[in-house]
Structure formats: structure tokens, C-alpha cells
Amino acid sequence: MAEAAIDRGDTEDLRRRQLIQATIESLADVGFVNCTLGDIARRAGVSTGLVAHYFGDKDGLLEATLRAMAARLGRSAAARLRAARTPRARVQAVIDANLAPEEFDRRTSSVWLAFWGQVLHSARFRRVQNVYQRRMLSNLRHALKQAVPPRDAETIAVAISAMIDGLWLRATLSGDGELDNAGARALATAFADAELARARPAAAPAAPAVARSGAEPVRNHVGGAPIRSAGRETFASVNPATGEVLAEIEIAGEPEVERAVAAARSGQAVWGAMTGAERGRVLKRVADLLRARNEELARLETLDTGKPIQETVAVDVLSGADAIEYFAGLAGTITGEHVDLGPRAFGYTRREPLGIVAGIGAWNYPLQIACWKAAPALACGNAMIFKPAELTPLTAVKLAEIMAEAGVPDGVFNVVQGFAETGRMLTGHPEIAKVSLTGEVGTGRKVMADAAQTLKHVTLELGGKSPLIVFDDADLDDAVSGALLGNFYSAGEVCSNGTRVFVQSRVRAAFLERLVARVRRMRVGDPLDPATQVGALISEEHMNKVLGYIERGRREGAALAAGGERVTAGALGRGFFVAPTVFDACSDEMAIVREEIFGPVMAVLPFEDEDEAIARANDTPFGLAAGVFTKDLSRGHRAIARLQAGTCWINHYNVTPIELPFGGAKQSGLGRENSKAAIEHYTQLKSVYVNLGPIEAPY
Ligand code: NDP
């Protein structure tokens, strides 16, 4: 008796699920109005009467369908929440469940949209919708209450859930690929991070702590684990906002570099033998871990670089994760080609890894640079030995730990620490096949010369003094935004900055007025304060170099329109802060116009016509980047085609999506990072001729 009841229950349940599935298909195919009981019955292969028997009328069936979809989403969120270990991870679980790829599937999304459109007219649908919204809110609220004060938890929960719904809607409705599920997820993640950073109680403990006396030094990371240096020599990493020592770092000498090369050799043998898809799967886990630890890593990057937390939490870690995710996706697509050589032969090429690659990083975007280099190198099957700049050694080690945790085989990604001498051990090492450097032009020359001894491949991402041209028809507020982004982001320590701002004479006064008003409102302050927009420069020495250029600008006759001084108010006096500085009435011969300052110093230069602007913009040995602001698109494209630069923007500045190649022309560099173009720089082609017939020999 009991068994029969269970059987009947199972059958009914099965039938209901079958009818709900048919309803989803009908809604997806013919839309809300044309979805009738008859159509649903036909799809399920049953009579209309049977559908009515189970669900009453069309509304009953639709309500059951909406409940089923909301329940599936609820189960997916609950499973993710169970696996999440921290409050931040629980917030992420909600984001990930709601913005999961399956929620963007065309059928699923068209069904959700059909319901959303009816919610206003149907109390039954509204009830289900309310349950779904309340569940999302309470999951978020519960997680947030453990991270921020209760009032903030409430408003942030509402803001994140609105953001999730808005992003889903936007991505679903934008047919032109403006936003996909990964993009929506990244935006929601960045938004949640920014909200949390803003709301975190001021008294939150600083993690990681400033080095305590007796603390263990940070070690070189070789063969998947930290190793002790034979020489035990260390250097200190200093927080540029306070002058405090963050950590002592062990220097890699000859023995450690040799160990790293040996580890890379055996790691590469394993890694290079895996299929691209397998490597991609592991790298995707690295990207996920980076995103999950965004907050912790952003904080460490802010301590090490002095950059504002509002930047590091939104850009540094996430753009590194983007790179790893992008190349994880490409890893399985790297192939050679077949070449037809007639009926008696054919040829093919194999795209093979280079072997061991050295990455040498600059100090302005330490983690991002490590990811931008490691991502293509590893996707192509190489092993990497990375040396961070000695001023910012901390986050590369975290990346190595994350690689190990994600399952990257030992020895595939190693970090050696030290100064130029350690770098030179890499550039001169005969077993290293390639060097990718981000640094100054002078360093680029030395690295290339050293690499030439063993004929290594080189990619050089070097400095710049890039032009940003504002024509008189430009949207001036946008042009000012571009100039601010292109000069003061990361306190001006960005290689591609548009520090020569050419403004057409007719709009110069208006441009300057709006620019200066906005510069004066910028907040220089403690980099850990989420409201801070301009943080510290990297070191005292670098600050003095920047202040020296400002002094030279004054002496050479440029007119100071804003800033121009070190900022020492309150606790800032302990660090290396310089106010965002604008010079007007600059001329092309001035040192502040010719040389890379790598600080928050903008030079405004008037011009009369297009030919003049282009000629002056190109009058530099650098060629990293260029930007043009104009509403005349023909002029925009014409001007960009004539500008000698590797990376250009029309009506924007300093955006670097991973899908586009990044790199310099002239003395700003060789090779390209990011995009499919990077694959060329981390692989070599092997050509294979295959004979299919007898060999004709004259002997
Ligand atoms: P540096 O050129 O001083 O240093 C870059 C890296 O090279 C550091 O890790 C440095 O070690 C190492 N190094 C220095 N000399 C040698 C050598 N002879 N052989 C091997 N390695 C060496 O640059 P910064 O760190 O000062 O960075 C700022 C510069 O980087 C600016 O010019 C900026 O424009 C450029 N840059 C370019 C980017 C691009 O993509 N085009 C992006 C970001 C920055 P250590 O620091 O330990 O001495």
C-alpha cells in the first residue's frame, strides 16, 4: 500500500516536472502571450485536460514554473553558501549563483524575462518574485553583518542585489555583446568589494601586519614552496604611506636562481606535456582564487605600493585575474596549421612552448604585471621565473602560493627576489629562453643587451611620454575625465599616461577651468581610506625626483595651475605624497614635457591645428600610447592612424581590456602583452614536412 502510494507520488512528480519543462520550452520559443495550455500539452505529448488536471489553469502552471526556476536558483545559491568559508565568500556565493552562466542561457533568460514582464500584473507571480528577492537579500544581509556595521549591511545588501538584477537584465538585453555573464560577474564582484571597502569599520585590523621584530622573512618561492636562501641576506619592503617596514625579504643569489632554473626545467616538462585544455582548467582555478581573495590581496598591494585601496580593490587584482582567465580560455585553442604541398607531401606546424621564461616586473602594478606575464607564458606551456621589483616584492609571492593551491605543478611558477643583480642572473642564464621585462627604457636596453649573449626572445614594456590631444569639438567634460584618468590614476605612476595634454587653443581656457576645478577636489590621503583618490608615491627617492621635475617646470617658465607641492598634512608627513599638479603654458622643449616623470604631473600645451598637433605629439623617442578627444570620428581615426604609438584611445584614456594587445612603438618597447597577439611571443613554430611518396634522388 505504502509502496503504491510512493510510486504514484513519484509518477505525479515526474509528470509535473515534465509539464514545467514543456512550459519553459514554450515560453522560450513562443513568448508569454502565445504560450497556451494546448501548446504546452502538445510539447509534453499529453492532453490539454491532463495539464488542467495538474495545474488548474495557465496561471497555475506558470506560477509553478516560476517557483521551480526560483527554487533551482535557491538550491544553487545554498550549495555555494555551504562551501563558502568567509563572509566575503558568502557574498560572492550569492553573486556567483545569480550570475552563473546557466542563468544567461538564452532559453532560461527569455523565460525569466517573460515572468518579470508579468510581475506587475499578477499577484501570484509577485509573491514568488518577492520570495526570490527576500531570499537573496537575507543571504547577503546575513553575510554582510559579519563584515560591516549592521546599518551598512542593510544598505549594501540592497545595493548588491539591485546590482545583480540590473547586471543580469543589462547583459540579457544587450544583444551586441556589451556584457556577458563573466563581465557581469566581474562588475558585481568589484562593486561588492568597493562597497565593503568603503563600509569597513575604521578600526579593522591591518592585515597583513607590519613586520614584527623576529618575524620570519619572506622567502623566494621555488618548486612550489618557499626556500631558504643560502646567503640569508635580506632587504626591507617599506610602506610608502607611512615609512614603516612591512617585511624583510630574502635575496635570491646564484644558488637560488640555479634552483629556480632546475625547478622550472622539471616543472615545464610536466606542464608542457599536458593538453592546453588541461592547463586552461588549472589556470581558471588560479583566476577564481585571485577573485575570491581580491580584498586581502588589494590590501597587501596598497600597503606595498601606496596606491589607494579604491583602485587596488577595483583594478589591480581583478585585471590580473582577467588575464589569467582569458589565457586559460585560449590555452586549448593554441594550434599549428596544416599546409597542403600537393599529392605527395604535406606539411604542418606545431606551436610549441619556448621552455623557461623570465618575467621581470616594475613596481607600479606588481600583481597585475606578474599575472599579465604569467598568464600567456603558462597557457602556452612554459614555466616562469618571476622577479618582482625590489620595492614591491609581496604580492608575487601570494600569486605563487595561489598557483600552488590551484594545482599548477611545482616549478612552473617561481618567484626570485632581489635587485638588478638578481634580474641579470636571469637575463644571462643560458637555459632561459625568453625575458619579458616591464621597466624603464634604460633597463630595457640593458636587458636586451644581456639577453643577446644567448639570443633570447625579449618582450619589453617600457616607459612613455604619451600625448593626449583634445580637439575643439570634443566633449570637454569627457576630455577632462580622460586627462585626469591619464595623469593622476595611481598617483601618475602609470607607463601609458597621457602626460602631454595638447589642447586646441579655442577651448584651452574652458578646458583648464574645468580641469583645475576637478583637480582641486581630488582627495590625497591615507591609501587605506576608501575615500582616498591619490595615494603615496612609491619611495622617498622617487618623490624627490618628481618634486625635482616640478621645480624644473617652474624654473623653465611653465605656469603652475594646480598642486605643485608635497602633501604633509597630519600623518601624511610620514609618507611620500605629492599633490596632483597641472602646468599650463608649457612648451615642447621643457624637461617636464620631454622626460617621463612617472608622477602626478600634467603638462598642458596649446595647439592651433591638426597637423601641428600630430607633428608635435610624435616628436619624442617614446611611442607607448596616445589619445584623441573629438566628436568628429573621421578626424579621430585619421589622427590616431598618424600617431606613432602602440596603444591608442579615441574619446577615452588608459583603459586596457585584456582582449586588446598592449605595448609600445619606437623606444617604448618590443612585442605585445595581452590578447591573442601574446601567444606569438610565448611560443615557437616547428615546421614538419611529411613525404608521402618515393624519394627522387640524383645519386
Ligand atoms: P626599472 O626599469 O627600474 O626596473 C624594472 C625591473 O627591472 C625591476 O624589477 C628591476 O629590479 C629590474 N632591473 C633593473 N635593472 C636590471 C638589469 N640590468 N637587468 C635585469 N633586471 C633589471 O623600472 P621601475 O621598476 O622603476 O618601473 C618604472 C618604469 O616602468 C617606468 O619607466 C614605466 O614607464 C615602466 N613601465 C612600463 C609599463 C609598460 O607596460 N610599458 C608598465 C609599467 C611600468 P629592481 O627594481 O629590483 O632594481
Image (cartoon, rainbow, N blue to C red):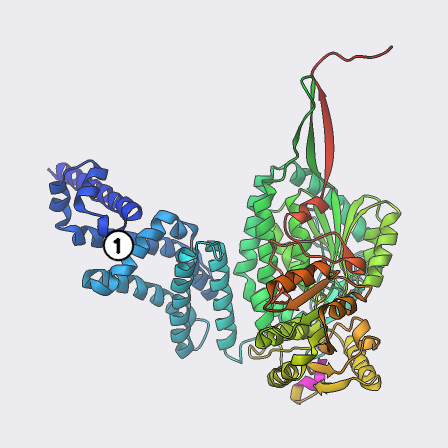
Mark 1: few, some, or many residues within 10 Å (few <14, many ≥20)? Answer: many
Residue 394 percent coordinates (x, y): 68, 64
Q: Which amino acid does label 1 sit on?
A: Leu
Q: What stretch is highlighted in magenta?
A: 572-578
Residue 84 percent coordinates (x, y): 45, 58
Q: In this view, does 562 lie to the left or right of 168?
A: right
Reply above or below: 346 against 501.
Answer: above
> What's the residue at 42%, 70% (across, down)?
144
| Label total for image | 1
Q: Is residue 74 left or right of residue 538?
A: left
Reply above or below: 515 against 134.
Answer: below
Circle 1 residue:
66
Residue 693 percent coordinates (x, y): 71, 13
Residue 345 percent coordinates (x, y): 70, 20
> What's the residue at 38%, 48% (across, down)?
106
> What's the residue at 26%, 45% (across, down)?
26
Is residue 13 visible to the viewer in this orientation of the structure? no
Tell whether position 172 is magenta.
Answer: no
Q: If the picture is divided into quarters, which one holds ligand 1? A: bottom right
182 and 135: which is toward the camera = 182
Quarter of the image for residue 299 reads: bottom right
Tell whether position 576 is magenta.
Answer: yes
